[in-house]
Image: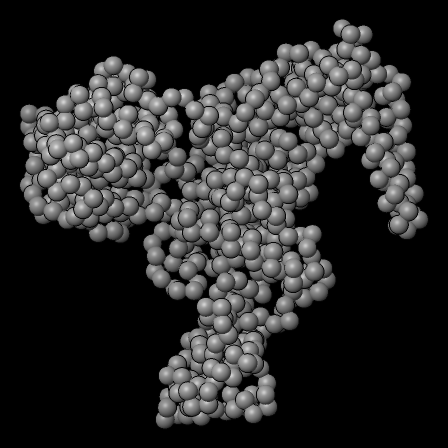
Amino acid sequence: MTAAATEDDPYVLPMPSPDSPIVLPKWIHPNNPHSVSSYHDLIWSLAALIDNPGTRLISIHWEKCPARMRGQLKLPAWTMINGQLRPTRIRSRGMATRSRNSAEDMASTCREWMRLARWLEKRGITDLAACTEDEWRKYPGERWKGGVSRGYAEKVLGWLTDLWLFDQLSAHPAGIARPPWDSEGIDDFLPAVSNQGGGENSTEPLDPQTIGPLLIWAMRVIEDFADDILAAWAENRRLTALIGTVSLVQGGQAAVEAYLMPLIETGAPLPSTRNQGKNTVARTFIAATTGASGGQVDRFAIKHGLSALTAQRPGPCPLDIPVTGLINGRPWRTHLDFNEAASLMKHLGTAAMIICLYLTGMRPQEVQGLRSGCCPDPEPGPNGAPGRHLIRSRHFKNVTDEDGNHASEGEEREVPWVAITPVVHSIRVLERIVPEGDYLFSAAHHDFLFQRNHHGALKGEALNQRIEDFVAWANHEANAHGLPGQAIPKDPHGSIGMSRFRRSLAWHIARRPGGLVALAIQYGHMRTVLDARTASGYGSRSRSGIHGVLDIETALAAADTAAHLRDRIAAGEKISGPAARRAITGAASTPRFEGRIVPRTFARKAAKFLARDGVVLYDNPEAFLICAFKHDNALCEPDPGATAPRQYACQQGCGNAVRSDTHARQMRERADEIDLKAAFVPEKLAKRLRRNADNLREMSDAHDATAQTAEALT
């Protein structure tokens, strides 16, 4: 075949031959290392189109297509992979349409075409030309019987329309009819509206009771255990390299006997490892320690019945390195074990990933795309002040090339992320694991157990499983160290997936003032950085980034606060404070938000809602008040242009404060708790606690003396 398009129509590609590559060279990035399948193959690998390190490699399996229609579907599929839709067609389908889609979308499209082909075959149709308008009208109803969301059904109809479009652009069109929804509109062909949502903002945030201890353990592993774990892995690798270095002639068998016979004769525990739930001979450790080969260890084990003895007297495989990490002032291990070095390295990488995901606001694929050297130490600022650590990264969502085609390699963010200290420490740990310039979560260098040379970064499925494994390990450690209160409880909304961290960051900042977002570690800095949109650009670029998510959560939290205040007022509660009248106005003018589905347009509406200076209500449970935020009145010193208060810096006497009878009751309850605690602490601390309790009671008394009903205030 020739690579050029036909002279008559540049969008119609020439006919491929059986040996033609399924991806033409012009679509392959110069640094892409993957091989290309041939047209006649039954499995088409699309790896040559994938340059995103966090995306799994995808293939199209044609054996799932009815044989008599396979050739008819292969041709439009090849045309889709190597061709482009006409510009007029793209404009008619809307802004979201691209002339070329991602490899994942192409594979999904082909799978949907094969599903249609199987349905047609069951109806006795084995030629796409026989798929007329009547079949098109019947198919969607059959397709939705398995149950699909309305949003996904729209994608399916789009993929089916692509079959007609790319068939027309093929060198020899099969003649499939135009789907009726392409001319009539898709509404009548979609399933009924359901309560199922989709998109980033319908993802449930992590429960506070889960994310708190999860973050504690992640930071503990990075800050306290990382040096021990890295040293254990280095020693494990050093010892493993010694296996078989002592030959049979040099006395490898003798070295095994010299090491094990004293343990056998004295009844001491024998080096063991767990295999399928049983204690077995630690063959690798013994070979590494003695320099013998695995075969020499096996011969000794058979001769002396070592398997049975090890099952009776299992022992550790200690590494000769010091333990420096502490838990509650005590060493976290009596020794580090040869057998656990690989799993500890896996947990170390997972801990770093959790911190990077949660304390930056990056999307998962952005974290997967980080490379060693992405966060250099900053130059000192003016007057020698320390500069901020900035993370240079690539983003991948909705990235297109200059022709509007999907760009799998992504692009570097125009504005870097700002990294707080725990994130910087995590990156430094990861840089000790991978070579310079490689991905921080390189699949090859994080495969500690099998040492397979995988390409790119660890994929989402593997990282999600590592999070679950980390939780199980942390809970085991909490139990072993007598810290049941630091166990990580199961999240009520299911597994802890990577996609939930970004949502949780915004949720905790918007709804949990006082430190839960980072457990009081630089929380103020985190919120300051997020608010400084024009100064630092923490999450901003041409699109709204993390700020759109934060605005949504803040708006929803403010709506909840207004709704709760309305309910309290309706129940007869009184309110007090200099902003009481504004709070009543704000509560009355704020719509109640029901449910969890958030449309794509809500981010813009949320930002507009929050810009209503003076009537947006922010609950601050730590200060026992509501802030009717008016920028000029605020004593918390918000940044210029800020639409939300610094709730962690709330000041008494602020003109934005509002209290209800509920707040007064909560203050008295808190005062009673403090008094109870004061009875069990040293006297100086007890006096301070009682003084705090007295202040809370004074503020609640002041509320009682000045509180009025809504009718009296309006």
Judged left or right of residue 50, residue 43 is left
Judged left or right of residue 76, residue 341 is right
Q: Quadrant of residue 573?
A: top right
Q: Residue at x 54, y 25 (%)?
A: 595
Judged left or right of residue 699, residue 12 is left
Above or below residue 254? Residue 595 is: above
x and y percentages locating residue 43 in the rendered image: 20, 48
Q: Is residue 654 visible?
A: no
Q: Is residue 457 visible?
A: yes
Q: Residue at x 41, y 60 (%)?
A: 447
Judged left or right of residue 87, residue 314 is right
Look at the image and tell me in which quarter the C terminus lies: top right
Colour scheme in use: one colour
x and y percentages locating residue 569 in the rendered image: 74, 15
x and y percentages locating residue 658 in the rendered image: 76, 20
x and y percentages locating residue 659 in the rendered image: 78, 22
Q: Residue at x 81, y 7 (%)?
A: 712
Look at the image and tell me in which quarter the N terminus lies: top left
Foreground of the two, 364 or 142: 142
Q: Quadrant of residue 248?
A: bottom left
Foreground of the two, 376 or 247: 247
Q: Quadrant of residue 484?
A: bottom right
Q: Residue at x 25, y 14 (%)?
A: 184
Above or below residue 48? Residue 272 is: below
Tell how many labels: 0
Above or below residue 63? Residue 329 is: below
